[in-house]
Amino acid sequence: MKIWFNGKFIDSKKAIVPILTHTLHYGSGAFEGIRFYKTENNSVIFRLDEHLNRLFYSCSVLSMKISYSQEEIKKAIISLIKLNKLDEGYIRPIVWYGNKMGLYPGQADVNVALAVWPWESYLGNKPIKTIISKFIRLHPKSIVADAKISGYYANSVLASLEAKNKKADEAIFLDYKGNVAEGPGENIFLVKNKKVYTPKRGSILPGITRDSVLALLKDLKIPFKEKEISPKELKFCDELFFTGTAVEICPIGKVDNTFINNGRIGEITKIVKDLYCRVVRGLEKKYLKWLNFIK
């Protein structure tokens, strides 16, 4: 497998990162997860510009100056997909501080890498089992919540380990107020009485898939609202689903010991999931603006 490493295409096995790399020790990196899909004629990357905008924003939060423009990275991603002869899969851009110890990263070199690989459904297509985690989402005054920073994900790893240890597929975070926040790598949506609700910004990473779903709901004329959601509301809803680049649209069939919609995918969830699958594969003309075509 070939990767792009600081401007060069190399074999992934030849990529070397020093042990005393700042980001390895302190989590001072930024990354993105992006999917590309096979269509009838070619492959498309879903919302590439928005992902790269967020990557550069996350880097700015860490005072990281990337030596490449967004356009250069975009071209490198497309070239890398072609080089690896993939027609569908996952893209991982990552930016990190290099060989320097001590918390302050000043004077450390900034590195950029791109990797692509085939990746099927992250949590499967059937309704999943979840638990409400004993860990809370990071406090919004401790971090910059809308940046995608590597170190934040230690919080997500702890919740994911907890879920697996309890024989669940995934966890659900509450925020510092005790309200529903999100999953370890997903946003969450609730359906009650044909209306859709999702936690408002503040303690969540407002995902690009989340933004896409809000746009789809608007076009479908399905009423929705961003609001604070209590754990009780979570367990007494009609439908529940996760959204995210990796997970796409994933129905939730159980929270702790409570079944949601008898463990089955809900009507609105299915409508959103089916439309999303068509959108990312270029089957809906209205949303072609979200796609970058690989020719």
Image (cartoon, grey):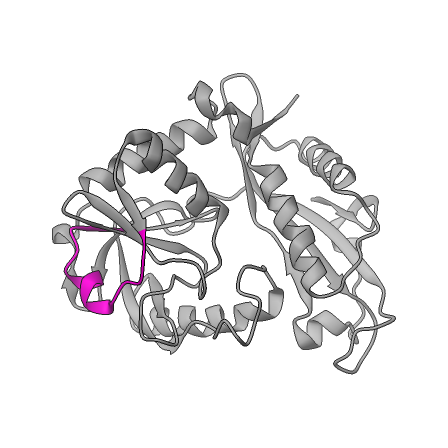
Tell me what residue is drawn at x 78 percent, y 78 percent.
Answer: 104
Does the stretch in magenta take in 238? Answer: yes
Q: Residue furthest right?
A: 107
Q: Is residue 33 left or right of residue 103?
A: left
* Quadrant for the C terminus in the image: top right
In the displayed structure, would residue 9 be above or below residue 233? above
Q: Residue furthest left?
A: 262
The image shows residue 218 at horizontal and vertical percentages of 34, 35
The image shows residue 95 at horizontal and vertical percentages of 72, 57
Tell me what residue is drawn at x 45 percent, y 64 percent.
Answer: 202
Q: Is residue 97 left or right of residue 39?
A: right
**Residue range highlighted in magenta:** 226-240
Q: Which image quadrant for residue 223?
A: top left
Q: Is residue 30 left or right of residue 188?
A: right
Q: Is residue 151 left or right of residue 78?
A: left
Q: Residue furthest bottom?
A: 102
Q: How many marks?
A: 0
* Quadrant for the N terminus in the image: top right
Q: Nearer the viewer, residue 96 or 89?
A: 96
The image shows residue 221 at horizontal and vertical percentages of 27, 32
The image shows residue 244 at horizontal and vertical percentages of 44, 49
Does the stretch in magenta take in 136? Answer: no
Q: Which image quadrant for residue 167?
A: bottom left
Q: Which image quadrant for residue 162?
A: bottom left
